[in-house]
Image (spheres, rainbow, N blue to C red):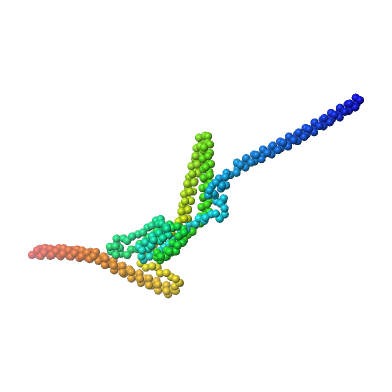
Amino acid sequence: MKRKFLQCLCVAIIVALLFSSCSASKGSDSSSSLNGATSTESENVSLSMDEADSAPPPEETGEEIGQGSLSEKPDGDFTEKIIYSANANIETTEFDQTVDNVYTLVDTYGGYIESSYVTGKDYREEFYGYQSYRYAEFVIRVPVQGYGSLTGELDTLGNVLSINEISDNITVKFYDSQSRLDTYKIEEQRLLAMLEKAETVTDMIEIESRISEVRYEIESLESLLRTWQNQVDYSTVTISINEVRELTPKVERERSYWQQIWDGLRDSVRSIGRFFKDLFMGFVISLPVVITVALGATAIILIIKRIVKVIKMKKLKKKDDGES
């Protein structure tokens, strides 16, 4: 009996030990799984915080910018920014009428004259009749819609010797500068928010210094963009007008060798004729001065001869008195 009791007791102890070991094993497994889940969850929270810190604010993604940056605009949403300009050289025999026609042409296409320079007749031409040739230069700003029409009517002002047209596409530079401007404005807002939260004088000074730099960049970019936009909206046409006696003949076909000789000979004869014509005109205009100078020279010569004659007579008289 005792033996049986001892056997049962041993079996009970062994079962109890086995049960306790299994419970401990299960507890450790559950705690380790709990710890693993907790660490994984903390890593996910940390990762999400890092992503939140590193993610750009809504302003940078173009959601609250308004115009937005270049990269955030949809394709085809850009207006090309092209600056058109032209330089024309014109000659005319009716200078005053041509100048008046320039003002009329500018008013017709809604433009304005940015600058002008016109030479006038001098005193010699008005008083003596000398031929002097005048010159004028106009810098015209015209809306881009009327640029092509205005340049197409330049031949109504006179003989167009040359016209040089230039188109400068600044689309990429324009929108790149606009994007930089948006970035600086966002930085300014952030700096202002940081300035409100600054606790030390050193931090405030550093932030205010950076704000000044950012605002300078903003003003520079805004001025540049306004200048570019004005040049895009209003094209520039520079007109140079020369007054001439005869218009340069237009050569519509290639001249032969003998035709070139004949034209050169004809121009030489015309030049010689103009030279003698101007020489005769100058002589006639200067005739009063020539006559005055000639009369003065004649009078001086007569006076000198009279003096010489008197001196000779005195010498002869002294000689006769000495001989007697």
Q: Residue at x 30, y 63 (%)?
A: 125
Q: Residue at x 47, y 55 (%)?
A: 232
Furthest-left residue in this view: 324
Furthest-right residue in this view: 1
Query: Can residue 277 be seen here?
Result: yes
Percent x, y of residue 144: 46, 58
Percent x, y of residue 194: 53, 39
Percent x, y of residue 87: 44, 60
Q: Quadrant of the C terminus?
A: bottom left
Q: Is residue 270 left or right of residue 74?
A: left
Q: Residue at x 33, y 63 (%)?
A: 132
The picture quadrant where one finds residue 292 is bottom left
The picture quadrant where one finds residue 261 is bottom left
Query: Can residue 308 be seen here?
Result: no
Query: Relative to the observer, which residue lies in front, 265 or 52?
Result: 52
Query: Relative to the observer, which residue lies in front, 197 or 239?
Result: 197
Q: Is residue 74 left or right of residue 120?
A: right
The picture quadrant where one finds residue 20 is top right
Q: Quadrant of the N terminus?
A: top right
Percent x, y of residue 306: 16, 64
